[in-house]
Amino acid sequence: MNTDFNLNRRIFENSDKGPELGTPEEQIIFEKIQKTLAYQYKNIFPDKFAPKTVVIVPSLTLDMEILSKIKGSIHYEERLLCLLMLLRMPKTRVIYISSMPLSEVIIDYYLHLLQGITGNHARQRLSMLSCYDLSRKPLTQKILERPRLIDRIKKLITDKSSTHLTCYNITPLEKSLAVKLDIPLFGTDPSMFYEGSKSGARKTFRMCGIHMPDGDEDLKTKVDIAKSLARLKRKDPALRKAVVKMNDGFSGDGNAIYRYPELKIDENLEASILDSLSENIRPVSHDVSRELFFEKFEEMEGIVEEFLEGDIKVSPSVQCVIGASDNIRIDSTHDQLLGGDDGQIFLGAIFPADKEYASELGEIGKNVAGYLSKKGVLGRFAVDFISVMQQDGKWKHYAIEINLRKGGTTHPFMMIEFLTYGHYNAEEGVYVTASGNPRYYFASDNVQNDKYIGLTPNDLIDIAMFHGLMYDGASQEGVVFHLIGALSEFGKLGVVCIGSSPERAKDYYDKTLSILDFECSG
């Protein structure tokens, strides 16, 4: 992780408001604060009328050099704006912090989705704060560098016993912020980071008896990669490709595809692979060079896995929530939409996953959640799969990673849950609204076209209203936009298209693209 911890250490040393970053003293305080979370989760979270405050820090505390290769990555802070829907609870307060101020048009767009709450009432309970900092570093680091901003957040918290912090992912920086604010963090202690790494996930799958691709974990160097590639080739001489993954990669941008050249499978195989490794490996992200990939791999470490082949192959996932050791919930399943030359880049998702295997995914997720909860994991996480149809017509699911954080399927599900007051039935693999009607969605984070460059948030709202693309609370169908701030500069936005059938959800998506193309055709 490429974060300036020395800078943050200096911040703590110059402040009398907290212990030094990463010290035993900080860990003791953090563990004490976290003990209050179980009570909140059980008694305060589900109570619609309980006074509560949620501090939202949508920081993507990931490798910033890799993250910067994603178009409009700074606007990914907008993905957690779905949590503004918490304001539907009349005594809930939300404090939302971002790197730069978010457009009032965007905030108004989300608040208009609230049902039974006026915009004015919600506004009085919403505090939007900003670091006014576009630099290439994690949002949480920016907050920690601003003691006065931290003091401002603390002054907005009226009762710490009913307040918690939620983030996109959790690292030592988020833990330090929780200690600074003296409120619990809904998520896993970052000291357990390994459990959510690619290597840690493989060990969890092995302990749980779950199928996974053949491969090796805890690899550190090019030599380790070559050894693993040689072992896989010796075991399966017909193997054509393998996937090399950084432990802390995300959205597929930490992956690379290795294509086996014509090589003799003899005692020199490992040396031959090593000699030509750079020639035959290609990072999934076209903006990441081979040199940068290997540099980051040696920094993060990682795994090698066989590339799973199959005539019929899908990429589903299951999302789980661990509220306490005895409180496990299967929140959703999705069929993920993957793009790129080798299907490694996350583009979007279909919800729920296919009924043929959705309940199976739920059972696997419950198995993993039970194992991780015993190790102290908390909060939301997802298990991703590659599923291959066998000759007998049955699906075989290969678990490929665990994401101990929010992800690309988190905010779409939260939106449909907030908008319809429904729930996902993991045993049947269906989602029903509060009124008992099934709902589906087709969601994407990567609707991108250079023709859209120049469209402002105001323009998008005008287009959506004129063409009937707005979400309709009466029919509980329609389109919800996100990443709106990325549209004007990058021609990129996200959509969640909700329908009464999978076909209607996809029709909304197709209609949205058709209308945007028409409006931007000149």
Image (spheres, rainbow, N blue to C red):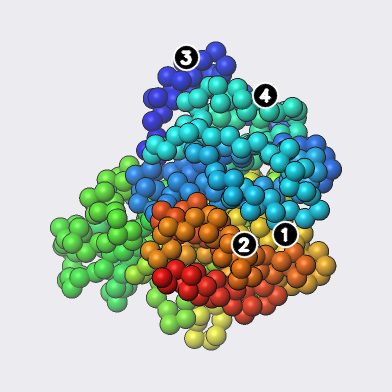
Going by the numbered disc 1, the residue's amino acid type is: Leu
Residue identified by numbered label 4: 155
First in sequence: mark 3 vs mark 1: 3
Going by the numbered disc 3, the residue's amino acid type is: Asn
- Residue 284 lies, in percent from the top left, at 33, 61
Going by the numbered disc 4, the residue's amino acid type is: Lys
Q: Does residue 372 appear anywhere in the picture?
A: no
Query: Quadrant where the N terminus lies?
Result: top left
State how far apart marks 3 and 2 are (Cα). 44 Å
First in sequence: mark 3 vs mark 4: 3
- Residue 147 appears left or right of 369: left
State how far apart marks 3 and 1 are (Cα). 45 Å
Query: Quadrant where the C terminus lies?
Result: bottom left
First in sequence: mark 4 vs mark 1: 4
- Residue closer to the observer: 56 or 243: 56
Q: Which residue is painted at 66% across and 58% down in the image?
A: 415
First in sequence: mark 3 vs mark 2: 3
- Residue closer to the observer: 323 or 56: 56
Residue identified by numbered label 2: 480
- Residue closer to the observer: 502 or 206: 502
Q: Nearer the viewer, mark 1 or mark 2?
A: 2
Q: Nearer the viewer, mark 3 or mark 1?
A: 1
Contact check, label 1 and label 2, Cβ < 8 Å: yes
Q: Is residue 375 above or below residue 415?
A: above
Q: How many marks?
A: 4
Within 10 Å of disc 3 (Cα), the crowding (few <14, some 14-19, many 20+) is few
Residue identified by numbered label 3: 14
- Residue 208 lies, in percent from the top left, at 57, 58
Tag 2, which secondary structure? Answer: strand
Tag 1, which secondary structure? Answer: helix
